[in-house]
Amino acid sequence: MGTDKIRLAIIDMNNNVPNQGLRCIRDIVSTFEDDLEWEIFDARGKNEIPDLSFDIYISSGGPGSPLEEGEWKDKYFDLVDSAWEINRREGYDKKYFFFICYSFQIACAHFELGKITRRISTSFGIFPVHKTKAGKTDTVLMGLDNPYYAVDSRDWQLIQPRLKVFEEHGSKILSIEKMRTHVEYERAIMAVRFSDEFVGTQFHPEADPIGMTAHFSKIENREKVIRNFNEEKYEEMMNHLSDPDKIELTHRTVLPRFIADALRHIRKPSLVVS
C-alpha cells in the first residue's frame, strides 16, 4: 500500500456475533481505496485496540449493554481520550472518529452527555429520524430528507441530554427519534456531533438494502418485527428497502460524507484530495 495514504481503523464491537454491519462498513471504506489504507481491530472479542497512528476511526455497533465492563474498555477510552486531546491542540493532525449504535452509546456515556437507559421494548426495524436545527446544516446529513430513514436495532437509548455538558464540549444534537404523540416516552437522541472531528449515530448508517433484505427476511427477524409491531409494519419496512430515497440514500450519504470530510481536512502534504 502507498505510504501517502491516510490510515483508517475499523473497530469491531460485535463480540464475535455474526452481523451485516461490518461488511457494510468494509464496503463503504473500500470505495475510498485510492486514498485509504485500512485495518480491522476486534475490540471485544480479542481485546484489539488500534493505536494513535491512524487518522480515521470507525467504531461499529454491537450486542449487549453499553454499561457493561470489559478489559478492552479502558484501552478503548484511552484511545478516544487521547484522540480528543490531540484534536484540542494546535499544530497537530486531527483524529476523526465515527461511533455507531453500541459505540455511540458507550461514547455518550463516557462523555456524560445524557442518561443511558434500557428501552421499554426493543427498537428493531426501519424508522424515520428527524433532524434538529443543527442537523439540517451538518455535513454528514446533507442530502438527506427530513425526516430521513435509518435501520435501528437497539435495547438501549440516550435520553435526557445534559445541555450544559453539550455546551462545554461544543457538542450538538443532530437528530432525534420519531415523534410519538400516542405515548409519553421521551424521544431518544439519534445522532450527535461531539466535536468537529467526532460524530456518532444511534442508528446504523452503514446498512445497505441487500444486507438488510437478507437480514429481515430471516424467519426469526420477520417474526420479531411482526411481534413488536404488526405484519403491515413489516411489509412497509420491506418496501422501504427497495426505495432509493430511504435506506439506500442514508447508506450512500452519512459514512461516505464523514470519510470524505475527514480526507479533506487531514493535513497530508503528499495527498491531494479533490
Image (cartoon, helix red, strand yellow):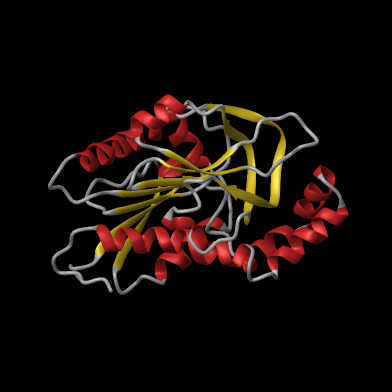
* Image position, residue 105 (x, y; %): 51, 36
Q: Residue at position x 38%, y 31% from top?
A: 167
Q: Residue at position x 64%, y 64% from top?
A: 246
- Left or right, 142 with respect to 170, comes to right
Report the number of numbered marks.
0
- Left or right, 265 with respect to 221, comes to left
Q: Residue at position x 15%, y 47% from top?
A: 92
* Image position, residue 114 (x, y; %): 50, 27
Quadrant occupied by the N terminus:
bottom left
- Left or right, 174 with respect to 244, comes to left
Q: Nearer the viewer, residue 137 or 107?
A: 137
Image position of 139 with respect to 121: above or below:
below
Image position of 109 with respect to 259: above or below:
above
* Image position, residue 183 (x, y; %): 78, 32
Figure quadrant of residue 178: top right
Q: Nearer the viewer, residue 173 or 116?
A: 173
Q: Residue at position x 55%, y 61% from top?
A: 144
* Image position, residue 78 (x, y; %): 30, 34
Q: Nearer the viewer, residue 55 or 169?
A: 169
